[in-house]
Amino acid sequence: MPEPDSTRFPVPVDAALRDAGWQPGRWDIRQAEEWADALRAHTTPAGHRHTVFPAAVEVWAEFGGLHLTPTGPGRQIAPTSLRIDPMAGIHLARTLADLGRALDTEISPLGEEGDSQAVLAIDITGRVFSIDHTGDWYLGADIDQALHTLVTGMEPARLTSG
């Protein structure tokens, strides 16, 4: 297997990204801005709205539309496929706002894990989270760490309240 050109990501993450169509320098700001506009325009029936901020838009521009399918067994848990598409969380404005309040930050949708098993979200500082039926999970301080956690099957840290 040839060495990847990028040293930004560990080999399994780099391979999954490249298999999904990513390459260093990828930047689709037009698509990211379309998603930002759609999220800003969406209001839930109860009146909840999404927040959109630069950290989210930058991740959408670089990784938006990618569907990653890890191939390894996972280090601690089985890795799941993931899709970077903030529209996967468009109907979760209240859920994301609640998490943001609990963490004293703003949260925006990022994508989903598996077949809609969990929504991925990003906060204003770039931290990445996963929200599923069992709770809220911290995936990493930035998208690079979150991708490493997800693709290599590292067990994420569970967020606790109180």
Image (cartoon, rainbow, N blue to C red):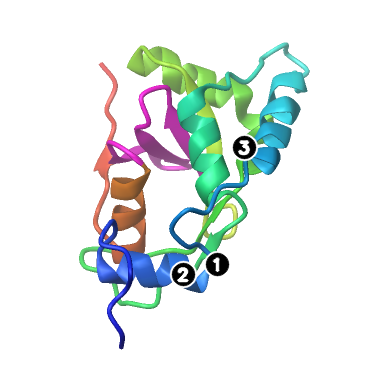
**Residue at x-position 62% and y-position 30%:** 92
Question: Within the image, what quadrant is residue 51 found in?
Answer: top right
- Is 131 included in the stretch rendered in magenta? yes
- The earlier-in-sequence mark between 3 and 2 is 2
Type of amino acid at the residue the image marks with label 1: Gly
> Which span is picked out in magenta?
117-142
Type of amino acid at the residue the image marks with label 3: Gly
Q: How crowded is mark 3: few (under 14 residues within 10 Å), some or many (20 or more)?
A: many
**Residue at x-position 21% and y-position 63%:** 76
Q: Which one is in front in this view, the residue at disc 3 or the one at disc 2?
A: 2
Mark 1 → mark 3, Cα distance in angstroms = 22 Å
| Residue 66, image x, y percentages | 57, 58
Per the rendering, the mark at residue 70 is none
Mark 2 → mark 1, Cα distance in angstroms = 5 Å
Mark 3 → mark 2, Cα distance in angstroms = 25 Å
Name the chief secondary structure element in magenta.
strand
- Where, quadrant-wise, is the N terminus in this rendering? bottom left
Q: Is residue 115 above or below residue 121?
A: below
Q: Is residue 81 above or below residue 42?
A: below
**Residue at x-position 29% and y-position 59%:** 9
Side (left or right) of 17 relative to 157: right
Name the foreground residue: 74 vs 45: 74
- Is 39 included in the stretch rendered in magenta? no
- Pointer 2 with pointer 1, Cβ within 8 A: yes
Q: Residue at label 2?
A: 18
Q: Residue at label 1?
A: 21
Q: In this view, does 69 lie above or below 150?
A: below
Per the rendering, the mark at residue 89 is 3
Name the foreground residue: 68 vs 117: 68
Q: What secondary structure is found at the residue carrying circle 2?
A: helix
Q: What secondary structure is found at the residue carrying circle 3?
A: helix
Side (left or right) of 83 relative to 154: right
